Amino acid sequence: MSRDAIADEMDVMAEGFVLTGAALRDGIRSAGFGELLGDENRIVDAIADGQGKSLCHHYFGNMENVASDPDSNDKSSAAGNMKMKGMIGPDGRIYPMFYVMGPACMLAATAEELDRVPNPITPERYAQAQAATREAINKVAKLVGDEVVDGHRTKHIVVDEISMKETLDDGSEVTINEMSIWLDPEYYVRRKFRMEGVIKRGGKTEPFFMERENQDYRRVGVTYLYEPYREVMKVGGIMSDKDRRELAKARKELQSAKQQLAQMPASQRAMMESMFASQMAQLESLVNDGAATVEVVTTDIEINPGFADTMITTLGGSAHSATLIRLIQTDLAKLGFEPGPATGKINAETSRAISLYQASRNMPVNGAPSPELATALAAEVGAL
């Protein structure tokens, strides 16, 4: 990506943080907890009037001094204390808008500074950075080799000598000594993950493992998200002595159930197997290796349902920022819809181009910019 494109993306992300803070504030008020909110009307009004840059300078221009001496008499000390405490202000009230100003301002400032970078990245410098990253990774991880997981070729990476400890609710202590990751080098996703170690319970130490396999990856709608629609998790070594006694009893009952099932007529046996196949498989897994298996199947993924409409309503339409409109104009032009110059301002030409695009894609036609429209356009342009 060009530096200009990266800067535009950072501007959009900065505005997204601000809109998220506004939506959070609106949600707290709608939930009936408005009395907990601090007075941020001035901040909201200033952002809506396009004065975000001056706000960033006012609230965060002197953060180094405030952070080093939070009890100083500096005029920004109250803001500094609020920033360091999260969204809780010195008065004990909640300030969602102030909470998001930090990352929003940092992103916006970074976007502005990109134009001043004296030595932009080159292929040579990028290769050097990659080599340094590989060297750092090789100190803690090793590539075991290629393996096939769920029908896909993966790179098996092992990280050992971890000694990561975790205490469970029942007082048991789990120590993870090794982690394995199976990465898909084609799609850059994790196909499988496994942790191995020991669990100490009541003076006894036994092997422990936790494994998760991600399957059925799909692209989500028109986005660039590539998500697993099926996950299989297996955990072993978590049973107590009481669990083992019950498991021994279950083993006998399972054997008896299998014998009874085998004596049934074929049609009846098939019906019973179809009804209880998953339960039988789960019980058999527990009986054989003491591992519990959980399978999660995702049928649908929604991305921020209704969120964009909430943000637009919250700030009275300010979600139609100059950056967002400029991106929409640029992508419309790439697709041949002639929106006019990418000025970041809505005019008749841009509105007509949006309407033509919406009509050609069977979308509701309103000629108005929106985050959803920008996402759809970006997906089409990215697929060119």
Image: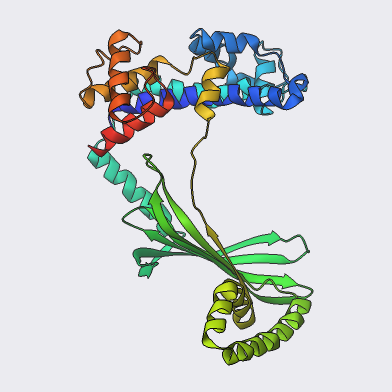
226, above or below 344, in the image: below
313, above or below 230, in the image: above
In the image, taking residue 206 as reference, residue 112 lies left or right, namely left
In the image, taking residue 144 as reference, residue 314 lies left or right, namely right
Quarter of the image with the N terminus in it: top left
Residue 216: quarter of image: bottom left
In the image, taking residue 126 as reference, residue 16 lies left or right, namely right
Seen at 64% across and 71% down, the residue is 198
Tell me residue 257's x, y (percent): 65, 86
**Count of all numbered marks drawn on residues in the image:** 0
Residue 185: quarter of image: bottom left
Instruction: Please say whether residue 32 is visible from this viewpoint.
Output: yes
Instruction: Please say whether residue 118 is visible from this viewpoint.
Output: no
Quarter of the image with the C terminus in it: top left
Taking depth in this image into account, of 14 and 61 the one nearest to the observer is: 14
357, above or below 58, in the image: below
Residue 251: quarter of image: bottom right
Taking depth in this image into account, of 142 and 305 the one nearest to the observer is: 305
Tell me residue 23's x, y (percent): 59, 24
Q: How is the protein colored in the picture? A: rainbow
336, above or below 248, in the image: above
Seen at 39% across and 42% down, the residue is 221
Seen at 51% across and 7% down, the residue is 49
Seen at 48% across and 45% down, the residue is 301
Tell me residue 374's x, y (percent): 37, 27
